[in-house]
Image: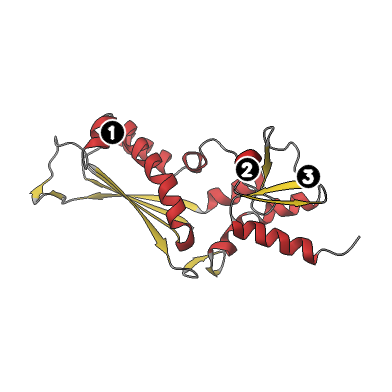
């Protein structure tokens, strides 16, 4: 679902910095900004988040060959479902550039010079193949939260998230109710959602639930 490719010139980073770069760019901890998901949903989310590193033998900058001793260069390409591209780009590009600057050791240089390029690519709807077949964005979100919904139906979601927050009942994301864009009130309880497809799916679930 999330596939990250990191490109650097061969020899640009020592083994320790390569390891740190991939651990951080390939971690959903950076993606979530400290906002936990329900453990069941997070487990599935982590299994869908993959990153690979390519070290390039030949790298040119303005037509000149990069050589050891030159400042490192970085290109990061992240593939996400197409309908998530804009929101994900706005959220992740600053995070990825910050992480690269910290690993590089020259945050200001990375921020003010074109040494790091982050490209978020939206994959057309229905062309992401995972969980045994092609899936749309909403299918993926619901699949990530399937195990969470199972424990929710059994009433096993305690302890819940921090005060003032709730779990999205469909995908297990932590939602701050005071600032949530998507909410729904039902049976005297207010639910928060990460996106409109999750809210729509939950409304449909309520409508199909047996009476009583």
Q: Quadrant of residue 10?
A: top left
Residue furthest to the left in view is 64
Q: Residues within 10 Å of mark 2 (few under 14, many from 20)?
A: many
Residue furthest to the right in view is 212
Q: Residues within 10 Å of mark 1 (few under 14, many from 20)?
A: many
- Residue receiving disc 1: 104
- Residue receiving disc 3: 156
Task: Say which residue appears at 75% left-offset and 43% top-offset.
Answer: 157
Indicate the secondary structure of the residue bearing disc 2.
strand
Residue 133: x, y in percent? 54, 70
Q: Earlier in the sequence, mark 1 or mark 3?
A: 1
Residue 171: x, y in percent? 64, 52
Task: Say which residue appears at 79% left-offset and 66% top-offset.
Answer: 208
Q: Earlier in the sequence, mark 1 or mark 2?
A: 1
Query: Where is the C terminus found, in terms of image quarters?
Result: bottom right
Q: State how far apart marks 1 and 3 are (Cα).
A: 43 Å
Q: Image check: 9 left or right of 53?
A: left
**Above or below: residue 49 compared with residue 22:** below
Viewer-nearest of labels 1 and 2?
Answer: 2
Q: Are marks 2 and 3 in contact (CB under 8 Å)?
A: no
Number of residue marks = 3
User: Of residues 180 and 89, which is closer to you in this image?
Assistant: 180
Q: Residues within 10 Å of mark 3 (few under 14, many from 20)?
A: few
Q: State how far apart marks 1 and 2 are (Cα).
A: 33 Å
Indicate the secondary structure of the residue bearing disc 3.
loop
Residue 38: x, y in percent? 65, 43
Residue 201: x, y in percent? 67, 62
Indicate the secondary structure of the residue bearing disc 1.
helix
- Residue receiving disc 2: 175
Viewer-nearest of labels 2 and 3?
Answer: 2
Q: Earlier in the sequence, mark 2 or mark 3?
A: 3
């Amino acid at each position: 679902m999330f596939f990250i490719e990191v490109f650097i010139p061969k020899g640009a980073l020592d083994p320790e910095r390569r390891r740190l770069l991939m651990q951080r760019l390939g971690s959903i901890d950076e993606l979530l900004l400290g906002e936990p998901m329900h453990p069941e949903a997070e487990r599935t989310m982590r299994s869908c988040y993959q990153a690979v590193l390519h070290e390039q033998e030949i790298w040119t900058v303005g037509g000149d060959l990069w050589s050891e001793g030159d400042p490192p260069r970085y290109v990061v390409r992240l593939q996400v479902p197409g309908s998530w591209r804009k929101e994900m780009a706005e959220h992740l590009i600053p995070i990825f550039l910050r992480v690269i600057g910290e690993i590089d050791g020259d945050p200001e240089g990375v921020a003010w010079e074109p040494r790091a390029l982050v490209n978020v690519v939206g994959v057309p709807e229905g062309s992401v193949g995972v969980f045994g077949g092609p899936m749309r964005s909403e299918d993926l979100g619901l699949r990530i939260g399937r195990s969470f919904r199972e424990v929710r139906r059994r009433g096993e979601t305690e302890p819940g998230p921090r005060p003032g927050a709730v779990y999205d009942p469909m995908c297990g994301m932590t939602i701050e109710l005071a600032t949530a864009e998507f909410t729904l009130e039902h049976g005297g309880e207010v639910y928060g959602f990460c996106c409109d497809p999750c809210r729509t799916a939950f409304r449909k679930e309520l409508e199909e639930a047996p009476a009583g």
